[in-house]
Amino acid sequence: MSEETKGTVPAKVGVLGGGRMGAGIAHAFLISGSNVTVVEANPQAAAAAKERIESDLAKSLERGKIDGNLDKWAENLSVSLEHSDFAECELVIEAVPEIWDLKVSSLQQVEANLSENAWLATNTSSLSVDGLAAELKRPERFCGLHFFNPVPASKLVEIVIGQQTSDELQKLTLEWVAGIGKTPVTVNDAPGFASSRLGVALGLEAIRMVEEGVASAEDIDNAWCSVTSTPWARSRSRTSWAWMCALASRSTSNPSSAPASHRRSSCATWSNAASWARNPARASTTTRSLHSGSPA
Ligand SMILES: NC(=O)c1ccc[n+]([C@@H]2O[C@H](COP(=O)([O-])OP(=O)(O)OC[C@H]3O[C@@H](n4cnc5c(N)ncnc54)[C@H](O)[C@@H]3O)[C@@H](O)[C@H]2O)c1
């Protein structure tokens, strides 16, 4: 980010889907002064989203992580079931589950309800921003804004630039990410963007090391933890492994577009890791040992 980039936030922000990520994104903009409208799929999900956002704000305040007024934030938050409530938003960020058809139909519905000057972003972690843009009427007003979990504690936001994303949106996203006190990284649309691609390369290397009997999963974790604070084999959730397998398969199903580090991965390794992610009890010895800490 250039030194001149100023942090500002849109006056009105919309968030589609108030689950884990959507609630965190709403939290980030509320504490930075935006009015936030969250649109959910049904009344139960809407009530849960409101409760999640308000209780996370209260927790952050209690822990002294943020300053502000809970009543004011509650006043600035609305949760609804109507896409038309996005009509006055300057920016809407989509955070529905990572399902292609759901993303496409949701983004198209949101786009149809936006003003001409509004911007649209997706929080997808693994789908192609260019692919999603191709399904929209105004792809130049669309990009990826990849927040990390948990949003309140994570500094990084990847700004994913599609081939048709306008220069103006690229500039605005830098201002917005700075405005919510986070660190922007700008990356062109590519499988895994920047952070996840690095993560997959690291995870694959850890899997290969266990597979080759170089060290136990626990020792590889300990080695890694001595230089960073991220344990890989022990603390990667099953969801994370399933997601990483999906991302690597996306690369390996089209080897010519896969990053070199992903191309080197063995099919057996991935199918074992994918089995573990689906059902740890049925995964092969190699993959189980990765997670139990014993060498292959
Ligand atoms: N969880 C993570 O660690 C993480 C990190 C980065 C990015 N992401 C991405 O963020 C997105 C959301 O993930 P999440 O973990 O918050 O999921 P989640 O399941 O916690 O939340 C999704 C929310 O979307 C709502 N929803 C579903 N269909 C909807 C619809 N048609 N209209 C409005 N709302 C709808 C659900 O009710 C739910 O509240 C995904 O694309 C995911 O890949 C997740």
Image: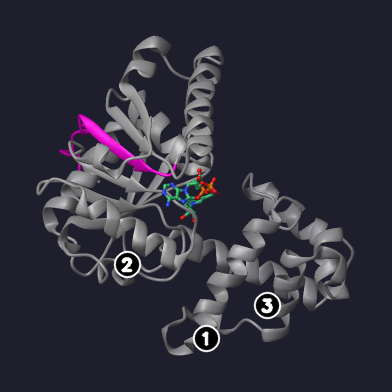
Question: How far is disc 2 from disc 3 in space, using C-alphas?
Answer: 27 Å
Instruction: Answer yes or no: is residue 264 visible.
Output: yes
Marker disc for residue 132: 2
Mark 2 or 1, closer to the camera? 2
Q: Mark 1 = which residue? A: 253
Q: In the rendered view of the protein, which quadrant contains the C terminus?
A: bottom right
In magenta segment, residue 76: no
100 displayed left or right of 218? left
202 displayed left or right of 260? right
Classify mark 3: residues with Cα within 10 Å, few (<14), some (14-19) or many (20+). Answer: many
At which x and y percent is residue 205?
65, 71
**In the rendered structure, which segment of residues is drawn in magenta?**
2-17
In terms of image quadrants, where is residue 102?
bottom left
Residue 64 versus residue 229: which sits nearer the camera?
64
Marker disc for residue 270: 3
Q: Are the residues flagged by discs 2 and 3 in contact, CB closer than 8 Å?
A: no
- Classify mark 3: helix, strand or loop: helix
In the rendered image, the vertical position of residue 237 relative to residue 37, given as above or below = below
At which x and y percent is residue 169?
17, 51
Classify mark 1: residues with Cα within 10 Å, few (<14), some (14-19) or many (20+). Answer: few
Mark 2 or 3, closer to the camera? 2
In the rendered image, the vertical position of residue 222 relative to residue 76, given as above or below = below
Q: In the image, what residue type sits under mark 3?
A: Trp
Instruction: Answer yes or no: is residue 160 visible.
Output: no
Q: Earlier in the sequence, mark 2 or mark 1?
A: 2
182 displayed left or right of 91? right
In terms of image quadrants, where is residue 10?
top left
In magenta segment, residue 8: yes
Q: Earlier in the sequence, mark 1 or mark 3?
A: 1
Q: In the image, what residue type sits under mark 1?
A: Ser
Question: How far is disc 1 from disc 3 in space, using C-alphas?
Answer: 12 Å
Residue at x 50%, y 61% (from the top left corner): 196
